[in-house]
């Protein structure tokens, strides 16, 4: 009885197909190639809307920041500081201190307001952009949740950059800021496509966990993306004609739109690997 059972089991095992080398071994480059090709096949006419919305977002953000800086400069120019403060009486010095304090509060509050407006703009325009990229249905509920996500997520990165500028040594501050910006982009490009499929705040923990646990799958693709971005910026600097800066900006926006399709597909495929 045992002998017949053993022989039947061995015959079944012999009939089962043995895994080939191709299936047994994970080929990163073939896998990544398939993701790249499939992501570019998804690009349709929606990319035109994405490019327009991206251009609108960066234009509005730029004008808003320039407007704020101009207003601050005007306020600073109108603020008359006497050359000989020691000659002022106590009441005049107290008045000057109150004016300086009011100006400082105005700068801080207006800066916070600018950040909130930028987050609001990003939540609407970038929300539509990422929804179109990931083929997610756009709704008021989705954009509202995306706004709540960005108030936490973008607020954290803005606060981190401000803390670096205040606490880090002047010589090392730029390096820390660049590192924070790269880290922010790295985590954000995984968070947003995950959030579009599962729109809740837990997506933050899922994205951070995925980015850390599977960093070996993200590292090379992101390095290539950053290298191509650097080359495009350097080529843009070589252009010397009217509106060359505008052309470079449009090229970078088109590049970002194409990359967005790829990173969203990459995040989805990496999430499947256990």
Image (cartoon, grey):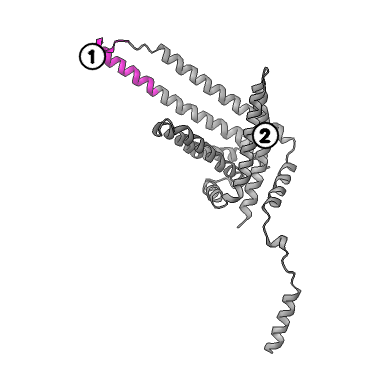
Q: Front-most of 267 and 56?
A: 267
Circle 1 packing at 10 Å, graded few (<14), some (14-19), many (20+), is few
Specify the quadrant that holds the N terminus.
bottom right
For label 1, the SS is helix
Residue corresponding to mark 2: 255
Label 2 or label 1, whichever comes before in sequence order: 1
Residue at position x 61%, y 42% from top? 223
Q: Which SS does the magenta portion mostly show? A: helix
Residue at position x 67%, y 88% from top? 2
* Residue 66 located left or right of residue 102: right
Q: Is residue 261 above or below residue 210?
A: above
Is residue 54 at least partly visible in the picture? no
Q: Is residue 106 above or below residue 174?
A: above
Q: Is residue 24 above or below residue 143?
A: below
Residue corresponding to mark 1: 90
Q: Which residues are magenta?
A: 83-105
Is residue 95 at least partly visible in the picture? yes
Instruction: Identify the disc placed on residue 189.
Output: none
Specify the quadrant that holds the C terminus.
bottom right
Question: x, y percentage for residue 27?
Answer: 68, 55
Magenta stretch contains residue 104: yes
Residue at position x 73%, y 39% from top? 43
Q: Front-most of 200 and 13?
A: 13
Q: Is residue 254 above or below residue 4?
A: above
> Looking at this rendering, what residue extends furthest in the left direction?
90
For label 2, the SS is helix
Residue at position x 71%, y 35% from top? 46
């Amino acid at each position: 009885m045992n002998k017949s059972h053993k022989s039947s089991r061995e015959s079944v095992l012999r009939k089962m197909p043995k895994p080939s080398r191709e299936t047994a071994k994970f080929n990163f480059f073939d896998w990544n190639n398939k993701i790249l090709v499939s992501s570019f096949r998804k690009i349709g006419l929606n990319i035109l809307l994405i490019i327009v919305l991206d251009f609108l977002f960066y234009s509005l953000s730029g004008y808003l920041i320039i407007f704020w800086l101009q207003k601050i400069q005007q306020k600073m120019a109108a603020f008359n500081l006497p050359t000989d403060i020691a000659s002022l009486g106590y009441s005049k010095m107290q008045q000057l201190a109150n004016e300086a304090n009011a100006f400082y509060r105005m700068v801080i509050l207006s800066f916070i307001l600018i950040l909130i407006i930028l987050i609001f703009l990003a939540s609407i325009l970038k929300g539509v952009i990422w929804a179109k990229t990931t083929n997610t249905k756009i709704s008021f509920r989705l954009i509202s949740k995306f706004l709540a996500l960005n108030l936490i997520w973008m607020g954290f990165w803005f606060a981190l950059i401000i803390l670096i500028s205040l606490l880090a040594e002047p010589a090392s501050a730029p390096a820390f800021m660049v590192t924070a910006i790269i880290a922010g982009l790295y985590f954000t490009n995984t968070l947003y496509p995950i959030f579009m499929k599962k729109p809740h705040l837990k997506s933050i923990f899922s994205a951070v966990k995925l980015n850390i646990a599977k960093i070996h799958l993200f590292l090379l693709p992101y390095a290539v993306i950053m290298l191509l971005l650097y080359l495009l910026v350097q080529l843009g600097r070589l252009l010397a004609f009217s509106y060359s800066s505008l052309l470079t900006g449009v090229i970078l926006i088109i590049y970002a739109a194409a990359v967005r399709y790829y990173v969203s597909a990459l995040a989805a495929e990496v999430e499947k690997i256990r």
